[in-house]
Image (cartoon, rainbow, N blue to C red):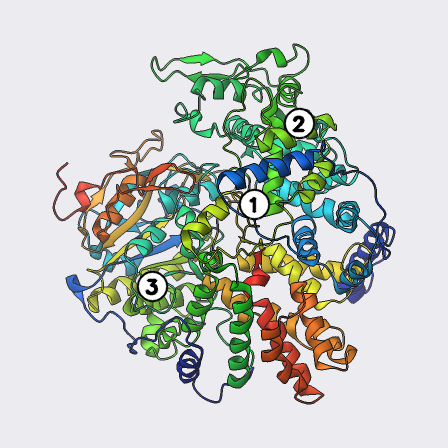
Amino acid sequence: MTTPSRSRRDFLRLSAAALGLSFAIPGLTLRAADARGVERKKSLLTIWLSGGPSQLETWDPHVGTDIGGGNDGVKAIQSTIPDAQIAHLYPQTAEQLHHVSVIRSLVSKEGDHERAAYMLHTGYRPEPTLVHPSIGAIATHELSDDKVEIPQFVCLGDSPFPPRGGFLGDKLDAYRIFNPGQNGQNLRSNVDTDRQQRRLKNLEVVSQSFRRGRGVQVDHTLHQHTVDAALRMMTSEQLKAFQVEDEPAAIRDAYGRLSFGTGCLVARRLLEVGVRSIEVSLNGFDSHAKNMEAHVNRAKELDPALATLFKDLADRDLLQSTAVLVIGEFGRTPKINPLGGRDHWPTGFSCLIGGGGLRSGAVLGATDPTGQKAQPENPIEVANLYATVLHTLGVDYAKEVITPIGRPMKYCAGTPINQLLPEPLST
Amino acid sequence: MSRLPLPVAKIVLPLAVVVGVFVVVGASARTRVMRRPPADSGRITTDADSVVAKVDRLFAKNWANANITPANPADDLTVLRRLSQSLHGTVPSLEEIRVFEADLQPHRMERWVERLLADRRFSDYFARRLARVYVGADEGQFVVFRRDRFWAWLGEQLQNNRHYDEIVREMIADRGLWTGVPEVNFITAAVNEGTVDVDKLAGRTVRAFLGQRIDCAQCHDHFFADWKQGQFKGLAACFSKVSISPVGVEDNRKEKYTVQDRKTLEDREVLAEVPFHSEWMPAEGTERQRLAAWLTHPDNRRFERAIVNRVWGLMFGKPWIEPVDDLPNPNEAGRQHDDLLDVLGGDFREHDCDLKRLIANIAATHAFRLSSDHPESESPERSAIIDNTWAVFPLTRLRPEQVIGAMLQATSLKTIDQNSHWASRTFRFFQELNFVKEYGDLGDDELADHSGTIPQALLRMNGEFAKDRSEGTPFSAPGRIAGMSPTAEGCLDLCFLVCLTRHPTVEEQVQLLPQLEDGRGDARKNAIEDIFWTLYNSAEFCWGH
């Protein structure tokens, strides 16, 4: 790869001026949003546990019971939330749990990975004629920030079902970073500055011929707009947020240097730049066989990263402005199958939720320790969870939009969970 | 059993098997080489009584009523590009363009439509587009295998020009294993964790074959069409006998199909029932066979209207009525001469549901031959009227495989088809998979309005694939063009022909020729690479026009 002789930003300034391209370069601020605490625009951070994590081996252990795996099962440890004991696989998270709340009674009707991932990203069941936007896409659409030159909806890690823009448009599909810590793909030009400039000038001429007699139609394609935005991103200082080299070694060690830990660290850096919505995914929870082994293994990555993330966000005063959700597509069966595994379980599974101005330290719902009752106490619908998240981000969760097929659709069909709001919502 | 040395067992044998399969498959898929101008089949006529003339009159009347002058006819090369993109998923090769330009016989376009339809690339590609409607675009390992089998089967049917109504009846009603009877994958695509999702099948059937949406009637009555929840359940019941067993898809399920009544909360049995004209449903046969007969019944105009609207959409990049599967009810009084779907649908029925004829008819219409530029398109108000009356060919985003197909074809001067070396075709296959993954699939709803994304722009500008596609090597078009034409004009013309299927304009020559005149060797090679890059990244390359 050829290294540009001048900095790419210089080049872009020159060529933008020379070509009269339709974008202006704002003043450089690495951190487009320097405000902290309540002053800061809110963002959403989702830790996506792909495959369906077992509630019993994470945030809802039932120690000593059959469903808990008897003597071979997890032990419980006290967390910093008085009412919450969690699986002993998460000692570091237990120390930071007071930053968030625990829900132990999520319910959905979807037990297939793809369908459930859809449900848990959008709050809606899949429909054949319409793709709903993920909650992250809605937040990005409603709260976008012109100062951010990099994508405002980012998905870190190799999740099989990344969140989508749905009827809000492909432009709101999450921008994917498959290997956290590295820059996104295709961000560097393959040729030197002079040739790149020649190419862009050529492109302008060819585009002009095509525009003739097609002005409105060509504008409607947004083709030039996306090319410009891509060029703007290629030269943005904010791209540094995707890299972790300048982070202190101690911080990198604390998050963990594997893909997921690095992803969480990158997520924090993206939040600092003002990225609106981020998902970091950790695969490998689909434990149909050897459930315990799988969860011990996953906890080794998840525990340090999650605990460090909670602490780091709080220390940097970013937690007040960042709604954090730790969730997967469903939980796992109370019954342990003959392979020592647990199967899919969409009724009565757990998540962590906090930050962004939500109450912390609450424990909602409970599952049956005998595993006989499928329905948990205080069942919480996914739609209500997402109404809560959108509400705390400052988005009108019940806003009705007209979809491309002409059918009106609410962002979210649920209502916020009062127990998680600082002040109950009167309706 | 004697053991083979490790490297032989682990590397050489599997490699030999893979190579062997490619060679055998490659050889068997070869068909007659078509390097000469195609002959006239006489399939399509355009005299005053023809369906094409009727469609043209319908458009002429609409334009007159809206006080609009339609765009000029597009030049033949542009029409050829449109046809290649919609029927083959790629652009014409330089080889094809040369034969086309040298073809001076009458009815050139009609003959070339026939040629494109006879090409195996048509049945492969069109089957894939249609298969999305019938078996969806979901991921998941089994789904993907089954979809491939289904796609191959559908391609065979199109290649043999089977009647469309017969194809549909087989999809809906056939029995057997998903491997040996691939059409049953219409059913298996709706199997979720061992259970047959009859609601999904009912919804998909109505959308795909009647061009209407009743999915919402799954839970409540349709808001604006007269679909009732009971009608939805009756249709779903047509699939309720389906069982999945070791011998495949059967109709052996004994349990009654019940649904919970929303008011009384009691389970009630639902029988197989159709929402209208039950007299079209035969008494004999399995529930699926009866449903299939009813759907494809000669008087069921929804069936023909649905496929006409969809094929129109695949050819123009935009269906006649949007969304593609939410059509108004047909006029009960009979076919209307001012209703495009009735006009084309009537001819489709009269000719035994011949899909190739339908495509050739659409390709012959005045509307399909219009240019995509119009002098009045600079004004937003006028432009909207021009678009809405189809007085200009629509500008629509190409599907990822059309973009990559075009890039791959542009780098090779020879046609990449079943006559190509197996390596080229295998290369195309894998490159396409990766590119579609990175570019992003449009899902089931592929005919809806989409704009491009930033990652796509980055992929085209800086991606490895695009870089390889524009690199001047002794084997690639960018490399060979430098050697093929001694003059700068000749080089530039070749670049434009292989990438954009047209010749450069004067302004483009003024900008680009000096770059090519600037010496020989690497300078010219680099200039050609830069021009390829430019053309790949233009809206003209990425959007259907």
Dot in front, 1 or 3 = 1
Spot occupied by residue B329 in the image (x, y as percentages of width and height): 51, 25
Q: Amino acid at mark 3?
A: Pro
Q: Nearer the viewer, residue A314 or A232?
A: A232
Q: Label 3, label 2: how many angstroms apart (C-alpha)?
A: 68 Å
| Placement of B428 over or under B239, stated as above or below | below
Dot in front, 3 or 2 = 2
Q: Label 1, label 2: how many angstroms apart (C-alpha)?
A: 40 Å
- Residue in view at x 65 percent, y 88 percent: B518
Instruction: Residue B159: name its quadrant.
Output: top right
Spot occupied by residue A136 in the image (x, y as percentages of width and height): 34, 53
Q: Is residue B134 left or right of residue A292?
A: right
Q: Amino acid at mark 2?
A: Gly
Question: Residue at label 3?
Answer: A304
Q: How many marks?
A: 3
Residues at discs 1 and 3 both on one chain: no
Q: Amino acid at mark 1?
A: Gly
Spot occupied by residue A105 in the image (x, y as percentages of width and height): 29, 39
User: Which label was assigned to residue B153?
Assistant: none
Q: Secondary structure at mark 3?
A: helix
Question: Residue at label 1?
Answer: B140
Q: Are marks 1 and 3 in contact (CB under 8 Å)?
A: no
Q: Is residue A397 left or right of residue A327?
A: left
Dot in front, 1 or 2 = 2
Specify few, some or many for label 3: CA neighbours under 10 Å numbering under 14, 14-19, or 20 or more.
some
Q: Label 1, label 3: how many angstroms apart (C-alpha)?
A: 32 Å
Spot occupied by residue A245 in the image (x, y as percentages of width and height): 39, 78
- Label 1 resides on the chain identified as B
Q: Nearer the viewer, residue B450 or A31?
A: B450
Question: Residue at label 2?
Answer: B346
Q: Secondary structure at mark 2?
A: helix
